[in-house]
Amino acid sequence: MVPLLVLGTFLVFILLDWLLSRNKVTQPILATAPASARPLPRVDPEHVDGFLVPEKLQYHPGHSWLAHERRNLVRVGVDEFAAALAGSVDKIELPKPGQWIRQGQKTWAFFRKGEKTEMVSPTEGEIIEVNHDLLRDPSLLRRDPYGRGWVATIHVPDEESTSRNLVPTGLVRSWMRDAVSRLYALQPQMVGAVAADGGRPAEDLLAAVPEANWKEVTGEFFLTA
């Protein structure tokens, strides 16, 4: 009877030792696995240094955008970076329906405190329609640049021309990041007005820098200087 008790006790010790050894082996794995498997912080692919840059659109180096509505018809507008640079404009001048425009041609203009700055078209074609709501309420440009603040629709006979000289899709983020860096270099006082940590940019970027020349700065980025 005693040997059986000893044997039983021995087997219990062996089982406990095995369980403790197993726990020691698996503990480091369990401790490190969650860290290695932890998902990376989410990066919003449609914001670059605080500016909204929708992926579904195409962009011209002069900061206008283009969206395909249907075959041979595109809608164009101003990206958020350009809208923030333009800021609180007093008036907007748009092309006339039926007017033929070329890619890179000065096509619409913004007026502010007696000064005028222009932007170029991202494509070539015939103006079909302009946004009359934008003419009545220029603030739409800044409040909703990719929606109600659109500029015009254009008939493009040659659809290949709509992608010619536009920013390559894979380079859009670096292009926008470079624009923000250039803005800082031109106007160091603006550091903080454009948030590089994912925050939103100021509504009117140049309002905080009264000594900045609005026409010159916008012309530099709109490629009309």
Image (cartoon, rainbow, N blue to C red):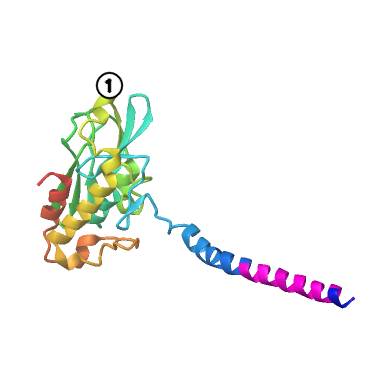
State which quarter of the image contains the N terminus.
bottom right
| Residue farthest toward the bottom in the current orientation of the protein | 2
Q: Is residue 219 above or below residue 76?
A: below
Write the start and end of the magenta stretch as one range: 4-21
The answer to whether residue 156 is left or right of residue 17 is left
Task: Specify whether residue 126 is in view.
Answer: no
Q: In the rendered image, which quarter is residue 99 located in?
A: top left
| Residue farthest toward the right in the current orientation of the protein | 1
In this rendered view, identify the residue nearer to me: 192 or 202: 192
Residue at (22%, 56%) from the top-left corner? 180
Q: Is residue 101 above or below residue 91?
A: above
Residue at (26%, 55%) from the top-left corner? 84
Residue 30 on the magenta segment: no
- Residue type, mark 1 in image: Pro
Q: Is residue 33 above or below residue 178?
A: below
Q: Main secondary structure of the magenta part?
A: helix
Q: Secondary structure at mark 1?
A: loop
User: What residue is shown with label 1?
Assistant: 157
Instruction: Rate crowding at label 1 as few (under 14), some (14 to 19) or many (20 or more) other CA atoms within 10 Å.
Output: some
